[in-house]
Image: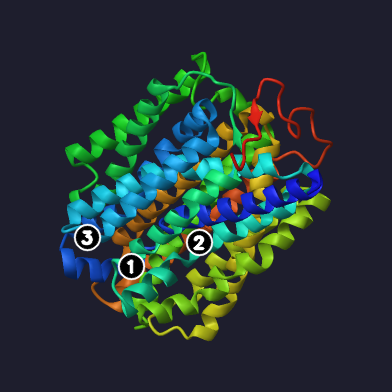
Amino acid sequence: MSQQTAARGRAVWALVITSVAGFMAALDNLVVTTALPSIRDDLGGALHDLEWTVSAYTLTFAVLLMFGAALGDRFGRRRLFLVGITIFTGASAAAALAPGIDALIAARAVQGVGAAIMMPLTLTLLTAAVPAAKRGLVYGIWGAVTGLAVASGPLIGGSLTEHISWQWIFWLNVPLGLVLLPLARLRLAESYGTGAPLDVPGTLLASGGLFGIVYGLVRGPADGWTAPLVLTGLLAGAALLAGFVLYGTRAKNPMLPMRLFRSRAFSGINAASMLMFLGMFGSIFLLSQYMQGVLGYSPTEAGLRMLPWTGMPMLVAPIAGMLADRIGGRPVVATGLFLQAAGLGYLAYVLTTDASYGIQLPGLVISGIGMALFFAPASAVVMSSVRAAEQGIASGANNALREIGGALGIAIMSSIFAAQGGYETGQTFVDGLRPALMTGAALVALAGVAALCIPGRRKPESGTEQPAPHARVLETAGH
């Protein structure tokens, strides 16, 4: 077998393995949304408990992503990838077997830990296995799979809940994880980063700060924004995050080097990613409930009617990746974000208690195309904005900010929904949904503005395409 054929085979296996792993991690962001009524019937729990079945996952996922990337850089990316899959698979089984709502929330938090280790390493392992000239197309396929997983969570969760049981939204991960473990061990090459010490203080500051803010946002509508625990969470969270930023500018080996944000490309794409996920997650969270609670669709029917939005990444994202290779990532990303903002704004304008599917369809299609145009070029911009030795940290930071945006999006848009409307009648739901969707549209449009700050296309700098001399890449696949 020639070296070229062997390299092509490694690239294909890396794409398959990392795409499936990314699908699992991304799917579990929103897979429980359409299952919440069934979970409440079986396990009980108040509304804020049900919110935590979503937030417990996104929160631990978000706050530990960069730490997971650093663990991979230090102890071996393939090795930690296997650890992450093992934790995620075991926690999925625990969630399916949960006897009560508290046990389910705990299992979801552990799932997030596994995803935080696994997800940032998918892009790093994929980048190491694919030649620079082919990365746009490969990132497009990876982005399509990941984007489809995020957006199709309500459909898959609703279908499994309606036709089997809600436990199967978690059992689904177990066979996938068991198949991935031997494949990843045999087919992925081991690689390492700089070997810098782990940043435990930075992880604690970021984790504590984000937990405080998300806790305050989740509890605020129920307890009141002036309640002592809510105020404490918000203020302490903000103080800890400020401490994290200050620490990152002074520490010798910070988890997230703040100097990376001196790059307009890195700053712009990360701001765009966070704002895009903030608007998108909150919108999907509420729209899936609108289709069931107001329009009367079953979970499966609601998911199928969202397919023009959720299925679009599989069709458009690979094309977007190739387009970004030709004209650069900035125009593709920005166009996608403005299209998604337009789609959300349209939906906010036309949704009523008896809106026909035909009137919703243009907004769903426009949002789907916009989301698809964002995913693949965004990944390419992130990975090309830093030196090869820092790609693990860059991937972790970008994924963390996306997840932070998702967690904050659900909390913020749910708060707007609760302040302006509620679940009492179809009209009160629409009264809360419309301003929430307009907020989501504004945030995604702001993400488009951030994307325009990314520098235009230029020749790659040395170090962004080739591994840094001190990065050790051990070709041990198959051993």
The three-letter amino acid code for the residue at tag 1 is Trp
Image color mode = rainbow
Contact between marks 3 and 1 (CB within 8 A): the answer is no
Contact between marks 2 and 1 (CB within 8 A): the answer is no
Q: CA distance from mark 2 to mark 1?
A: 16 Å
The three-letter amino acid code for the residue at tag 3 is Leu
Q: Secondary structure at mark 1?
A: helix
Q: CA distance from mark 3 to mark 2?
A: 25 Å
For mark 1, what is the residue?
168
In the picture, residue 319 is in which quadrant?
bottom right
Contact between marks 3 and 2 (CB within 8 A): the answer is no
Answer with left or right where residue 271 lies relative to residue 242: right
In percent of width and height, residue 110 lies at: 31, 45
For mark 2, what is the residue?
149
In the picture, residue 60 is in which quadrant?
top left
Q: Which residue is more in the foreground, 473 or 157? A: 473
Question: Which circle, 3 or 2, is nearer the viewer?
Answer: 2
Q: CA distance from mark 3 to mark 1?
A: 22 Å
In percent of width and height, residue 123 lies at: 60, 44
As displayed, is residue 50 above or below residue 245?
A: below
The disc at residue 47 is: 3
In percent of width and height, residue 453 lies at: 69, 40
Residue occupying the point 50% across, 49% down: 182
Q: Around disc 2, counting alpha carbons within 10 Å, would you say few (fewer than 14), some (14 to 19), or many (20 or more)?
A: many
Answer with left or right where residue 227 lies relative to residue 376: left
Question: Which circle, 2 or 1, is nearer the viewer?
Answer: 1
Q: From this viewpoint, is residue 149 visible?
A: yes
Q: Secondary structure at mark 2?
A: helix
